[in-house]
Image (cartoon, rainbow, N blue to C red):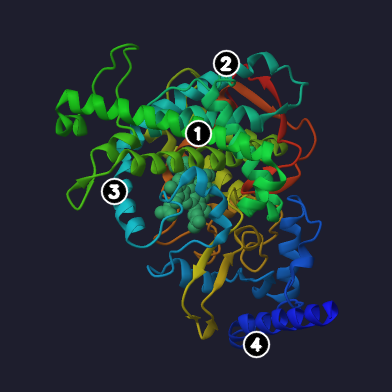
Amino acid sequence: MLALVFLVALTTVLVWDYFWRKRRNDILHYMPGPRGLPLVGNALMYRGLDAEQIMGFVSKNRNKYGPLYKVWVLNQLAVFSTDPHDIEFILSSQQHITKNNLYELLHCWLGTGLLMSTGKKWHSRRKIITPTFHFKILEQFVEIFDQQSAVMVGQLQQRADGKTAINIFSVVCLLALDIIAETAMGTKIQAQMSPNLPYVQAVTDVTNIMTTRFIHAWQRIDWLFRLVHPGMAKRQDSAIKVMHDFTENIIKQRRQALVSAGKQEKEKEEIKEDDDLGQKRRMALLDVLLQSTIDGASLSNDDIREEVDTFMFEGHDTTTSAISFCLYEISRHPQVQQLLVEEIHEVLGVDRHRPVTLRDLGELKYLENVIKESLRLHPPVPMIGRWFNEDVEIRGKRIPAGTNYTVGIFVLLRDPEYFESPDEFKPDRFDSTSPQTHPYAYIPFSAGPRNCIGQKFALLEMKSTISKLLRNFELLPLGPEPRPAMNIVLRSANGVHLGLQPRSVLAS
Ligand code: HEM
């Protein structure tokens, strides 16, 4: 009897599963992809895969199935694309702006801030936040990049002995946190000087926990994660509370200051002296949000908090990865380093203490090519995704509603069809005289209306910190080679190592 009940239940589930997938499978009959099993789809392919293997795995699939293929992971349908023509169609559209389930994990920290929101909310927030990155505001941030990079140089002096291998990733992470806290919230958190402060510790804790949950797909199911790892879940919740309380406090203080000053309009244009340190007072992202209104109503503290938290996350993890891998490439390519030093010498002169300006950074053209090439080989965001809630036709190919559309940025950036000798580090391919590739083949910052709003900010921050290090140190090829791993952003399983040696004369 029991066996019969089981058989009936199993048959019912199998029939339900068949019909649940049928429409989507019928529409995608033309698309290659691995053969799936009932119920689990292709989930077994992912068995035992760790973060280090993901990139190799998706590259292998691309070679086997081509630039557009489908995969079922349990009951979720994913279509992977690495064809820049198709990607252009999706990313340039105003319609396909809803993110897929890759991002859900971040919800408890970031809410529905700019990265995660969709529809009307995303449109209105994007409109408000865009002016934050006006060059007038970025110009003020350059000073912060320079000052915080000087702190990093000071911290590294004693380790710059020409023989110690330094894991530069963790050093850069604290620098990036200091920079984003000061630019986004207008607050110095002193991460580099005091890495054990509760807020700094909380950001590090949550980023690490999210990373673990990202790798072990089942941990992304919240109730299961809480059931199996109650200790980790508790640590995550309390760290998120520390961050939320911290951000909320700052929002309250700055709102209060604006109200009591009673001169919001004046504040918008004015950059006045700071009372305590005698430094210039700058507009932070937070100030723009405090002064913004949607349909006549100002944003609530909660609304603002999710945006500030989004910037704190997007603005530090990505740049940490980008700067670290770029420094690594420079340390392994002495000729590139030599050309960089010559350019820095020419643009900034030999006085390594002279602060840099926005205009200086604009003139570091070769450095820009080096950064672009490093972002190509080591894209901090290796994949992005969209959710299709209706059927979509991409250049004659129909993709059904209920699909997670995934853009394989990492694979695309090493596609030999668009980049000659794709695994080689060749900054000259970005020289203005070199032939250009398809514009949607090079998308480390994504593209279209939902591209990275912080792209200019990130490039300036990178130029500023990398040039600062090169003005002070020679980068040496010391330590183990990195083992790239996809952990929400691109990291390295064993850190990113290099050696430093004081640069006595900044000359060729
Ligand atoms: C090298 C560093 C960076 C890289 C490679 C990068 C890359 C990206 C990519 C690929 C996206 C698109 C994500 C998607 O479609 O799901 C994105 C979005 C975003 N980035 Fe960045 N990012 C970087 C730095 C920054 C910085 C410094 C900030 C803030 C200061 C920032 C803020 C954002 C925000 C808020 C979004 C969401 C934009 C929207 O959906 O409207 N990013 N970034």
Nearer to us: label 4 or label 1 = 1
Please identify the quadrant where the N terminus is shown.
bottom right
Q: What residue would you read off at disc 4?
A: 29
SS for dot 4? loop
| N-terminal label among 4 and 1 | 4
Q: Is mark 2 within 8 Å of ligand 1?
A: no
| N-terminal label among 4 and 3 | 4
Q: Is mark 1 within 8 Å of ligand 1?
A: no
Report the amino acid beneath label 4: His
Left or right? Give the position of 91 relative to 233. Answer: left
Q: What residue would you read off at disc 2?
A: 154
Q: What residue is shown at x 47% (from left), y 22% (from top)? A: 189
- Tell me, for residue 128, which label it has, or none: 3
Residues at marks 4 and 3, CA–CA distance in whole angstroms: 43 Å
- Tell me, for residue 229, which label it has, or none: none
Residues at marks 4 and 1, CA–CA distance in whole angstroms: 47 Å
| N-terminal label among 2 and 3 | 3
Report the amino acid beneath label 2: Gly
Residue 395 shows in the view: yes
Residues at marks 2 and 1, CA–CA distance in whole angstroms: 32 Å
SS for dot 3? helix
Q: What residue would you read off at disc 1?
A: 241
Residues at marks 1 and 3, CA–CA distance in whole angstroms: 26 Å
| N-terminal label among 4 and 2 | 4
Report the amino acid beneath label 1: Lys
Residue 341 shows in the view: no
Q: Is mark 4 within 8 Å of ligand 1?
A: no
Pinpoint residue 231: horizontal percent, then vertical percent.
68, 36
